[in-house]
Amino acid sequence: MTATNLSTNVPRGSYWITTFGCQMNKADSERMAGILEAMGYRAGTDEHSADLVLYNTCTIRDSAEQKVYSYLGRQAQRKRINPNLTLVVAGCVAQQEGESLLRRVPELDLVMGPQHANRLDTLLAQVEQGQQVLATGEQHILEDITTARRDSQVCGWVNVIYGCNERCTYCVVPSVRGQEQSRLPEAIKLEMQGLAARGFKEITLLGQNIDAYGRDLPGITPEGRRAHTLTDLLHHVHDVAGIERIRFATSHPRYFTERLIDACADLPKVCEHFHVPFQSGDDDVLKAMARGYTVDRYRRIVERIRERMPDASISADAIVAFPGESDAQYRRTLALIEEIGFDLVNTAAYSPRPNTPAADWPNQLSEAVKVERLQELNALVERTAQQRSNRYAGRCEQILVESSNPKNSNQVMGRTRTNRLTFFPAQNAHGSPIKPGDLVTVQIEEVRAFSLSGKLA
């Protein structure tokens, strides 16, 4: 990534970042927070008193976009009273709306797309010179040499590929995050080694379409396949000392390989947790979405995962009320969820997004149908998750402690290897405190749809 100009470390007041959307946005926010602190800003305690307010935005759903405008309205009022307030919109809404966002909210100082996250200090230097800055042009992402301000001291995000080359008919991501750009394996491993040296125990490798990792990097193996794949990357980074767990997201069924599944089964640090969106249980809807796979193809992926790792958790994304989706097609999505038994499904009713083909189709479904289908879907997802959780009852699970329970100071919380959030006492039998980063064994006493509770074994 672009090198940043961090030498001017002088006190500049407080900052506040609000992050909307996906894990990629959260990782971007951590990097931007690191840049701000290197510039001399300090983390604020409240967005309504901070000297610099940054909204890192998401445009995947219309509801998320409208929430951003609501927040911006309040900050614009602040800016009229206090012209020294610096107001920034970053991320996907910024990329999508660009100059029109500046016209709609003229109080903004900086509008910047996600490819410009690591240029934040350079762009703010222009703001300090009195400019209103728009940064949404194509940006080649070179190696990242910034230091992120991590929200966790145990679990860290590591970007491995930026952008997306897919053209799903409902999705705005390729137009706002740009073309795929893979980082070099050596750079990824170096970042992981740096995190391990700081005490991090778990790494999640991130990509909008992580299975596409490496296809833009040069090289062919003697066997005739490309030299850099996600499978190869997992092997390359697996031996980083100090890292106990490795996860990755988000996968695409079109590119999910048996070789990748075998690597996950064979590499001890790779967790038995897969996030593989299926989006619809009907082949015709999948074709209309331009997803590039069939329901049977998705079934075979799940079968192979469970053949190699019977206890693996599988989570997914699903969209209902896509344009033209009939009731029978919708019911096939419900049937697939019941058949597979997901540990978690992120659900959404279709939301037309700007500059996507499906937004212009005439066969849009009514809001009433969207609400009805989403409610039924969510109820099924919770029942299925509860059934999957039941298998943990009475079992002993290895938990990586992440933090104290914000709702109960007598408890800490962490996750199983299969990504179930688990709560348990903050002290062991001898009265010694359990600390973030500890790997402990917990006997599960209570199971809920999306979390567990237990005692130290």
Image: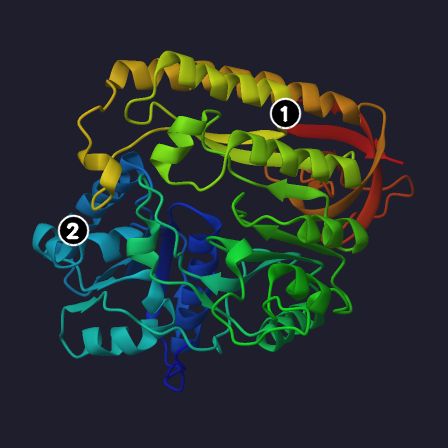
From this view, report whether residue 396 is shown above or below residue 93.
above
From this view, report whether residue 210 is shown above or below residue 74.
below
Identify the residue position indicated by label 1 in the image: 340
Nearer the observer, 84 or 446: 446
Q: Amino acid at mark 2?
A: Ala
Task: Determine whether the residue tagged by mark 1 lies in a helix, strand or loop.
Answer: helix
Query: What coloring was used for the rendering?
Result: rainbow
Tell me where residue 313 sits by quadrant. top right
Tell me the quadrant of the picture where the C terminus can be found: top right
Q: Residues within 10 Å of mark 1 (few under 14, many from 20)?
A: few
Where residue 165 appears, x then y in whole percent? 39, 57
Residue at the farthest bottom position: 7
Identify the residue position indicated by label 2 in the image: 76
Tell me where residue 68 sits by quadrant. top left
Where residue 444 appears, x then y in whole percent? 80, 28
- Mark sitting earlier along the chain (1/2): 2
Q: Residue at x 29, y 50 (%)?
A: 48
From this view, report whether residue 337 is shown above or below residue 57.
above
- Along the horizontal axis of the image, is 15 left or right of 359? right
Q: Residue at x 13, y 75 (%)?
A: 130
Where residue 120 appears, x then y in whole percent? 33, 71
Task: Determine whether the residue tagged by mark 2 lies in a helix, strand or loop.
Answer: helix
From this viewpoint, is residue 270 visible? Answer: no
Q: Amino acid at mark 1?
A: Ile
Q: Residue at x 63, y 50 (%)?
A: 257
Q: Residue at x 60, y 73 (%)?
A: 185
Name the disc covering residue 168, or none: none
